[in-house]
Image: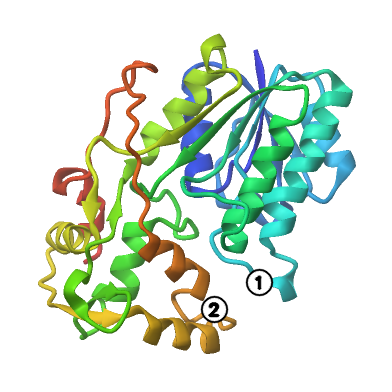
Amino acid sequence: MKIALFGATGFVGSYILDSLINKSYNISLLIRKKSKDKMVLPESSNIVFGDIDDIDAIEQTIKGVDAIIYNIGIIREFPKEGITFQNLHFKGLQKCVDIAQKSGVNRFILMSANGVKEDGTKYQSTKYKAEEYLRNSKLDYTIFRPSLIFGSPRSKNHKEFCSQLKKDMFKIPLPAPLFYKGLLPFNAGNFMLSPIHVQNVADFFVKSINMQESIGKTYNLGGKKSFNWSEIIDLIAESSRIKKWKIPVPVFALLLLATLLERFKFFPITREQLIMLVEGNVVNEDYFDDFNIDAIDFKVDNLSYLNRNN
């Protein structure tokens, strides 16, 4: 069985690729030329060099496959460089769906995100549009919506939440912010998240390929337990062996700062990222048993990668 994987060079994509290899699938990959030195490409795979704007490259990648995994996504856009949510989350998906239907490839699996909505941030709304476009196609689709994804990044180019938080927040001599809405800090740091390990996410994708019961389904993926922001900071600090004070911070102050500075790459967070963070991101469903997957819990033992090069 041959699988086309779009987005193999990213954090989650690298784990999906390894899982596909471990299950002995033949793989077809679309790789940007700029990214070919960022990963060890499987010798037995069909490698197409190009990008998601290249129709011919997409057609070559999809040719002869039995299923498609669309995992292209970004957490921050840079419009001047042509890196936008609209292009990568929606238009790229649109091209792949259209070509899949034309080519007779019926199985399609999409990486979305928990909390997507039509009237949300540009990240959320473009993910939502991608979901709707796929649902309205004639393809046998499965959509996964993970919450916060954690796990050891394979490359310095991979953006992993806990590692990035350690870099941006724990390496500076200031208390960690407990964000809160409004004027009074009564609920500072109490918004909830449901972290799920990247290997678990990869396993859901790969196991769904041949699961007939997953066709036409949308799965919200999260870990077995949810944590508030304050608890997450404590776990990251303990795993990194760093002592960190915490202090309530009104979110409107950082929103204003982000609005002014987010266009610069050095600034660690955008306005939309902050909005989504304090919204919380909780998953109440548990699909681990349905997919026969053992959950990797969000705990110090599984965050040991944060202690590297401390």
Residue at the spot of label 2: 265
Q: Please tell me whether residue 13 is drawn above or below residue 65 in the rendered image.
A: below
Q: Please tell me whether residue 138 is drawn above or below residue 172 in the rendered image.
A: above
Tell me: 53 left or right of 285.
right
Q: Tell me the number on the disc at residue 78.
A: 1
Q: Residue at x 21, y 43 (%)?
A: 302
Q: Residue at x 69, y 47 (%)?
A: 129
Q: Pick the quarter of the image with the N terminus.
A: top right
Q: 269 or 237, which is in the foreground?
A: 269
Tell me: 210 left or right of 162.
right
Q: Which amino acid is tagged 2?
A: Lys
Q: Where is residue 9 drawn, in percent x and y?
A: 58, 46
Q: Residue at x 54, y 78 (%)?
A: 265
- Which sits earlier in the primary sequence, circle 1 or circle 2? 1
Q: How many marks?
A: 2
Q: Tell me the number on the disc at residue 70.
A: none
Tell me: 17 left or right of 236.
right
* Cβ–Cβ under 8 Å for marks 1 and 2: yes
Q: Where is residue 52 drawn, in percent x and y?
A: 77, 48
Q: How busy is the neighbourhood of tag 1: few (under 14 within 10 Å), some, or many (20 plus)?
A: few
Secondary structure category for the residue under label 1: loop
Q: 159 or 110, which is in the foreground?
A: 110
